[in-house]
Image (cartoon, rainbow, N blue to C red):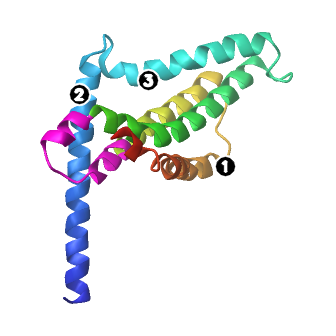
């Protein structure tokens, strides 16, 4: 088998795995958000609801270190959303694996597709988080710093860092 044939074969397997993982993501996404009252808005709503206590309580006990309340709210939101990107990379492949155990038992397909579905979830959520960050700058009335572009480039790396830790726990969800 030539090198070109091996590359084609590997590319075909990778493409098939991505399509299957993306299909699992869409199937699970639709099922998950049909069960909520708010539908797809819940993807953003649950993050904002987790953010409110941080701002309301943190500003009252002096976590802002003397910063203006609006800047404290913005910086705490940035920190929370960056942490959430890491956590999504760590947790979502396990979560998808747990939800897909029944399907995996009935339909034979590569288990790696669960990892791809978890990556799709993390990327989908990161898109919302970045939009929330931009909206936060708009609401506060501040311009994003020049290093914001570096933050955009670092967001996938934060997700990959979470995935690199979480990938070791995915097999435990199938036990």
Q: Which mark is residue 50?
A: none
The C terminus, quarter of image: top left
66 relative to 147, above or below:
above
Residue 35 shown left or right of residue 135 in the figure? left
Q: Which mark is residue 44?
A: 3
* Residue 98 percent across, percent down from the top left: 33, 34
Label 3 Cα neighbours within 10 Å, binned few <14 / some 14-19 / many ≥20: some
**Label 3: which secondary element:** helix
Numbered marks: total:
3
Q: Of marks 3 and 2, which one's residue comes earlier in the chain?
A: 2
In this view, which residue lies farthest toward the left? 107
Separation of residues labelled 2 and 1 (CA atoms): 36 Å
Left or right: where does residue 159 sit relative to residue 80?
left
Measure how far apart labels 1 and 3 are at the Cα level: 25 Å
Residue tagged by mark 1? Answer: 147
Q: Main secondary structure of the magenta part?
A: helix
Pointer 2 with pointer 1, Cβ within 8 A: no
Q: Which residues are magenta?
A: 100-119
Q: Nearer the viewer, residue 118 or 143?
A: 118
Q: Residue furthest front?
A: 175
Expressed as whole percent of the image width and height from the top left, the position of residue 64 reads 79, 22
Who is closer to the viewer here, 16 or 56? 16
Q: Badge 2 is on which residue?
A: 30
Q: Is residue 171 left or right of residue 155?
A: left
On the image, the x and y values in percent for residue 93 come to: 39, 42
Above or below, comparing residue 153 to residue 144 in the picture: below
At label 2, counting other C-alpha atoms closer than 10 Å, the crowd grade (few under 14, some 14-19, many 20 or more) is few
Task: Give the vertical position of 32 relative to 113 (above or below).
Answer: above
Say which element carries label 1: loop
**Residue 102 in which image quadrant:** top left
């Amino acid at each position: 088998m030539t090198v070109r044939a091996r590359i084609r074969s590997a590319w075909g397997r990778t493409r098939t795995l991505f399509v299957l993982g993306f299909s699992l993501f869409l199937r699970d996404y639709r099922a998950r958000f049909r069960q909520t009252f708010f539908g797809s808005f819940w993807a953003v709503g649950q993050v904002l609801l987790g953010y409110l206590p941080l701002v309301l309580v943190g500003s009252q006990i002096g976590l802002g270190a003397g910063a203006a309340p609006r800047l404290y709210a913005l910086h705490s939101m940035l920190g929370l959303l960056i942490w959430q990107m890491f956590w999504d990379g760590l947790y979502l492949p396990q979560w998808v694996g747990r939800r897909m155990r029944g399907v995996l038992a009935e339909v034979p397909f590569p288990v790696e597709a669960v990892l791809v579905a978890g990556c799709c979830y993390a990327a989908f959520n990161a898109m919302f988080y970045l939009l929330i960050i931009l909206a936060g700058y708009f609401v506060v009335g501040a311009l994003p710093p020049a290093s914001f572009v570096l933050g955009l480039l670092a967001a996938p790396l934060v997700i990959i860092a979470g995935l690199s830790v979480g990938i070791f726990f995915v097999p435990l969800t199938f036990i």
